[in-house]
Image (cartoon, rainbow, N blue to C red):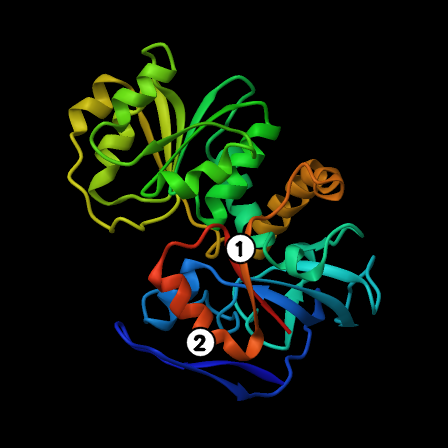
Amino acid sequence: MQALAYTEDRHHPKLWLDDVPDPVPGPGEVLLRVRATALNHADLHQVRGGYPPPPGESTIPGLEAAGTVESLGEGVEGWRAGDRAMALLAGGGHAEKVAAPVGQLLRIPPSLSFVDAAAIPEVALTAWTNLVHEGGLQRGEVVLVTAAASGVGSFAVQLARELGARVLVAGRSLERLQALLPLGAEAALPLGEELPARVRELTGGAGAHLVFDLVGGESIVQHLDCLRDYGRLVLVGLLGGGKATVPLFALMRRRLRVIGSVLRARSRQEKATLVTAFGDFASPRLADGRLRPVVDRVLPFARIADAYALLERGGVLGKIVLEL
């Protein structure tokens, strides 16, 4: 099969498609013939040498894919060859075939194409994990999503809406954020020093209950200031950098909580539990269109190097999907 190969380089990794052996599904896995796969910033970090896969997982990048089940590993029940599935992966998705843990599969509703399905697993489970499992978002609460025009952010907006929350979004481009208003965002705000004041204006002076933060860096100080007392911030991404100087007394005085979170490094068992909970809530909503991925563009698999360059350049609304 063909799969993404790369020379690991912090600044200018070289990417190409190479012939590699087909994966063999182990116990509790299925072999998925990939029809579409999507890109995430974690893939960029991996080819730069900054985000290796968990031990024992595929070294090929790619954290989500959609396709048809080709064969079953030992002990797999409830699936058969030919079934359409989308998979949350710890690696291996940027290839023609991938061995996927059965607990991390979701059935593709008939209304969804392979392209749309490929844009769902990583962003959807990241949103679910950090809004619900880590963030404890409740109906009627206010959530602020930063870098909301991203794939994860755009799905988090819809999921928070379906959970009954009020959703505010922030980002660098107000123009791109406008596309999130029909998806459930109440207001689009610019990142920066004025963000806390704008959030308080929209919340009667109180602030948000939860910040779903994909930015991090020094901006986290402003994002913490968007919270009301006893609020919580879940740090999901580091688009703004990996270091910050935080006024700790303000955290203590206002009883704020900062929760760090990753998805890829979680165990297969924990991921399976999250996938099941998400599927129970989201499958009917994916089937009838209440939840849908935002796809910026679709490229053929042969142009995977171009897709990585586009993601790195920025300005993408939602996901870049590769079609095989």
Residue type at numbered disc 2: Ala
Q: Which residue was labeled with disc 2?
A: 305
Badge 1 amino acid: Ser
Q: Position of residue 8 (x, y in %)?
A: 34, 78
**What label sits on residue 267 in the rendered view?**
1
Q: Looking at the image, can residue 260 be seen? A: no
Seen as rendered, the residue at the extreme front is 175
Q: Which mark is residue 178?
A: none
Q: Badges 2 and 1: C-beta atoms under 8 Å apart?
A: no
Q: Earlier in the sequence, mark 2 or mark 1?
A: 1
Q: Residue at x 51, y 71 (%)?
A: 56
Q: Is residue 6 above or below residue 57?
A: below
Res 143 → quadrant = top left
In the structure shown, which secondary structural element does the residue marked by tag 1 occupy? loop
What residue do we see at 23% from left, 35% from top? Answer: 192
Task: Calculate the distance from the C-alpha at mark 2 to the C-alpha at mark 1.
Answer: 30 Å
Instruction: Give the class, few, some or many, for how many residues have Cα within 10 Å of label 1's Cα (few <14, many ≥20).
Output: few
- Name the residue located 64 percent from the left edge and 83 percent from the top edge: 22
Q: Quadrant of residue 226?
A: top left
Question: Above or below — where is 211 with respect to 10?
Answer: above
The percent coordinates of residue 222 (x first, y second) are 23, 31
Q: Position of residue 59 (x, y in %)?
A: 48, 75
Query: Quarter of the image holding residue 207?
Result: top left
| Image coords of residue 138 (percent x, y) | 53, 22
Viewport quadrant of the N terminus: bottom right
- Residue 188 vs 308, above or below: the answer is above
Secondary structure found at label 2: helix
* Residue 270 relative to residue 228: left or right: right
